[in-house]
């Protein structure tokens, strides 16, 4: 709770230096608490600070703290239980970022042209149940599984990929995939990608992957799970990417458009 209060106080102090300084204290406190709930800082079922803790931490009166908490309750963000305190009842769910697909795919292809790919394995195989479900294939259908490591032009490995692709009839060979961007090969098979969904998280490095990426076992890696859809709205490619954050960063630029 002390770490949460310190984080909330830092947000409060930033607000007081800006336009929030002109609004009533209870609304300032309410806004800080509401933002922390809506962005997942204080997740579902978490216990909120008490009115006494808020008053002491933010140097406001109990009345101010109570009014801020009442506003949260009125918006159904928290529930107040006698003898048990206040708990968050709002469930935070990350909202997807919209971005132009053409620019994204071209950037991925360009990255492929300026890096070194080493194919560890390539095979036609039956995917595990979760991949079969995602790709919409039956239990006996074979898809292309490829495991690759990508290095920068200095030869430093930074990415470990495992991909599962349906509908490929040609071009998925070790030699071809080490010299041609994978997305180009997918296009050459008559598959036009129309949508890509990405989920970004973190994952600890297993011994084998740590060795491939020049990391230590247990190091935090950037994880990107990418689902690519064709014109019929079907997932045709699942790509599980792990990146060494010391050698790779993921940058997004968004505009108000």
Image: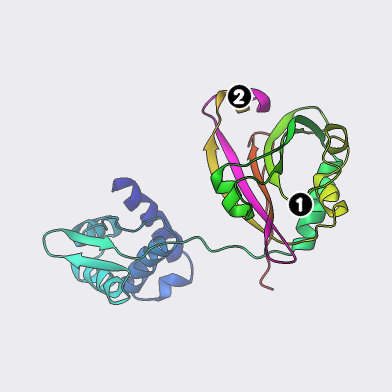
**Where, quadrant-wise, is the C terminus in this rendering?**
bottom right
216 falls in the magenta region: yes
Location of mark 1 (residue): 167
User: Residue 112: horizontal and vertical position, in percent?
Assistant: 82, 42
The residue lying at 21 percent from left, 59 percent from top is: 50
Identify the residue at image location x=54%, y=24%. Answer: 217
Q: Residue at x 66, y 28 (%)?
A: 213
Query: In front: 193, or 236?
Result: 236
Mark in the foreground, 1 or 2 = 1
Examine the structure image and report whether residue 111 is included in the region drawn in magenta.
no
- Percent across and percent down for residue 41 are 41, 55
Mark 1 or mark 2: whose residue is earlier in sequence: 1
Q: Which mark is residue 208?
A: 2
Q: Give the magenta range.
A: 210-235
SS at circle 2:
helix
Q: Quadrant of residue 26?
A: bottom left
């Amino acid at each position: 709770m002390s770490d949460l209060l310190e984080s909330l106080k830092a947000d409060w102090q930033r607000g007081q230096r800006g336009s929030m300084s002109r609004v009533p204290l209870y609304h300032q406190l309410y806004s800080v608490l509401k933002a922390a709930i809506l962005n997942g800082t204080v997740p579902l079922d978490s216990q909120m600070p008490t009115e006494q803790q808020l008053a002491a931490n933010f140097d406001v009166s109990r009345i101010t703290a109570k009014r801020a908490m009442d506003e949260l309750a009125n918006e159904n963000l928290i529930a107040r239980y006698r003898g048990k305190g206040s708990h968050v009842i709002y469930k935070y769910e990350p909202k997807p970022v919209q971005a132009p697909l053409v620019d994204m795919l071209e950037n991925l292809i360009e990255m492929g042209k300026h890096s070194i790919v080493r194919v560890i394995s390539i095979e036609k195989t039956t995917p595990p149940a979760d991949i079969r479900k995602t790709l919409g294939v039956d239990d006996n259908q074979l898809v292309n599984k490829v495991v690759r490591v990508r290095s920068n032009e200095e030869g430093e490995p930074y990415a470990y990929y495992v991909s599962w692709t349906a509908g490929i009839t040609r071009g998925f060979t070790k030699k071809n995939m080490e010299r041609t961007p994978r997305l180009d090969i997918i296009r050459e098979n008559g598959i036009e990608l129309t949508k890509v969904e990405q989920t970004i998280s973190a994952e600890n490095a297993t011994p084998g992957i740590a060795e491939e990426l020049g990391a230590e076992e247990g190091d935090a890696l950037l994880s990107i799970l990418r689902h690519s859809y064709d014109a019929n709205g079907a997932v045709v490619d699942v790509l599980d990417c792990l990146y060494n954050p010391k050698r790779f960063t993921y940058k997004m630029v968004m505009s108000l458009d």
